Amino acid sequence: MGLTLAEKILSQRAGKTVQAGELVVVEVDQVMVVDSIAGSFFKRLEQLQATPRHPEKVAIVIDHVAPAANVEVATAQKNIREWGAKYGCTVFDVGRGICHQVLIEERLALPGGIVLGSDSHSTTYGAVACFGTGMGATDIALAAASGRTWLRVPESVKVTFKGKLAAGATAKDAALEMVRVLSADGATYMSVEIHLEDGAEGLSRSERMTLANLTVEAGAKCGLVIPSGEILSEYPVPEWLYPDPDAVYINRVEIDLSTLTPRVSVPFYVDNVEPVEKVMGKKVDQVFVGTCTNGRLDDLHEVAEVLKGRRVAQGVRMLIIPASSQVLEAATADGTLLTLLQAGATLGTPGCGPCMGRHQGVLAPGEVCVSTSNRNFRGRMGAADAEIYLASPRVAAATAIAGFITTPERLEEVTA
Amino acid sequence: MPRIWKFGDSINTDDILPGKYAPFMVGEDKFHTYAFAHFRPEFAPNYQPGDILVAGRNTGLGSSREYAPEALRKLGLRAIIAKSYARIFYRNLVNLGIMPFEAPQVVDALHDGDEVSLEFENGVLHKGSETFQLAPPPEFLLEALREGSILEYYKRHGKFPGESA
């Protein structure tokens, strides 16, 4: 019986063939800790009376509230810097960017590797076929102390994306469609194995990150994109890092990219995905472009293309937060940033921004936000009744110009 | 007598503890008082230690924030009965010593405000004259729970449950 990609990675690491349902204890390549749980992480290590077994494999990223919004946070972040210096762990400080973007840029998540992050969107590392998964502070502390973790080898769902993206559709639309088809618990405890075929191999690393990122919104343990296209030219990909043709999948889903149209996830659940037409015309107060889902250079390019020569609608706040310092630098160098600012967008420090409702763009009661992020739960970005619509950077940009939910194509028609 | 606090499907970690009330935002001593602050503000002030949370499908979806179930633990929660759990939340519950019972039929038979008693160790739940048997979590997790927590287990044995030495 053949093995899935998740089974291949865990078998390789376990030194024996393991299959879905088995428990394994495996070495991990990298442990990633974010600022918001670092205090709990330190406390758990104290309870264990342990220090990091491999300090070079533990990185702490200050991104969830960066720069600090109050004295509590500032104190927690001061502790992080002191702790990192004391134990020799890397601290990526304010402004470096969002944990998942930083780990990919720093090449700390690599094909065939295993990375544990104290953030649910650690599935993002699957973009480069790295077994990335999120865990809480206790599991993360145990992994730092031992260098290992326990995992149940997951069953796999096969999601095949076919064809080239239709004009107007993006990887975000593909990812939202995947979550709709799977549903919010359709891949719970499972590995979502993403196969790109018939032209879909052309999706970039950034687009693969968007797909892998959103697999957790279907409950996935990890979301592994089979290496192809630019991943093969940019990374060392081990010979064994492919699923067997006769691998066993619990479910199979196929999504045709060539007929895909823009999607929007409607409050208050991510799998509430509708074609954009369904919510077209909905008035908005804020548009947010950024996060680990869609805060990269290609996302900012798409936004700039729509914003060029136009102005953000009166009464709409458009916040742009690049995913990392590298993204910000590149967008500055190639002029993208100027286009965004000239259109009336405002810029935040690379990091998570208002995604979880802590600072830099929290929503007031009754407000509506179109966001390129990944969660639209009740109260997520501020007031309990504020509404978050999740969309692609293109739809977000067109919405900012119009003041209501729309697409760049529709915007052309209106202004023509 | 402990009471049931019943919730529906898809209770997410932003419902359980909104991000803006994380311990590193409001302080270690206060964050638990914001449990279900948006969704059910009467919960935290009225919850009594030992009360049981009952929920539907995909309980705890969303963030990996362990401080969400930790807020419930701090209020005195020792057991949840749900139809199903999101993955990270399930691990976090076990790691905090909260027993995650999975029992879809029992969930349907329980109502908000019901008075119950739970034999924590063997998963027997009494409601009036009715008795329900709850299936326990997998053995290797119980192995850790029997020593207090997985932290205690690892500290004592230097390995994970089920791992060969």
Image (cartoon, coloured by chain):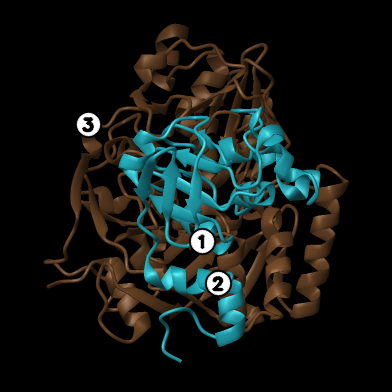
Indicate the secondary structure of the residue bearing disc 3: helix
Mark 1: which amino acid? Val
Mark 3 to mark 2 CA distance (whole Å) = 49 Å
> Is A14 positioned to the left or the right of B29 in the image?
left
> Is B97 positioned to the left or the right of A67 in the image?
left
Residue lying at the far front in this picture: please name it. Answer: B129
**Residue at the disc numbered 1:** B94
> Is B127 situated above or below B135?
above
| Pointers 2 and 1 in contact (C-beta within 8 Å) | yes
**Which one is in front in this view, the residue at disc 3 or the one at disc 2?**
2
Tell me, yes or no, if residue B86 can be seen here.
Answer: no
Residue lying at the far right in this picture: please name it. Answer: A71
Tell me residue A100's x, y (percent): 55, 56
First in sequence: mark 2 vs mark 1 = 1
* Residue B150: image tag: 2
Q: Nearer the viewer, residue A244 or B69?
A: B69
Tell me residue A118's x, y (percent): 58, 59
> Is A242 positioned to the left or the right of A205 in the image?
left
- Which image quarter holds the N terminus of chain A? bottom left
Q: Chain B takes which shade in the image?
A: cyan
> Is A277 situated above or below A290?
above
User: Which chain identifier belongs to the brown chain?
Assistant: A
* Residue A259: image tag: 3
> Is B154 situated above or below A279?
below
Q: Are marks 2 and 1 on the same chain?
A: yes
Mark 2: which amino acid? Ile
Mark 3: which amino acid? Thr
Mark 2 to mark 1 CA distance (whole Å) = 8 Å
**Which one is in front in this view, the residue at disc 1 or the one at disc 3?**
1
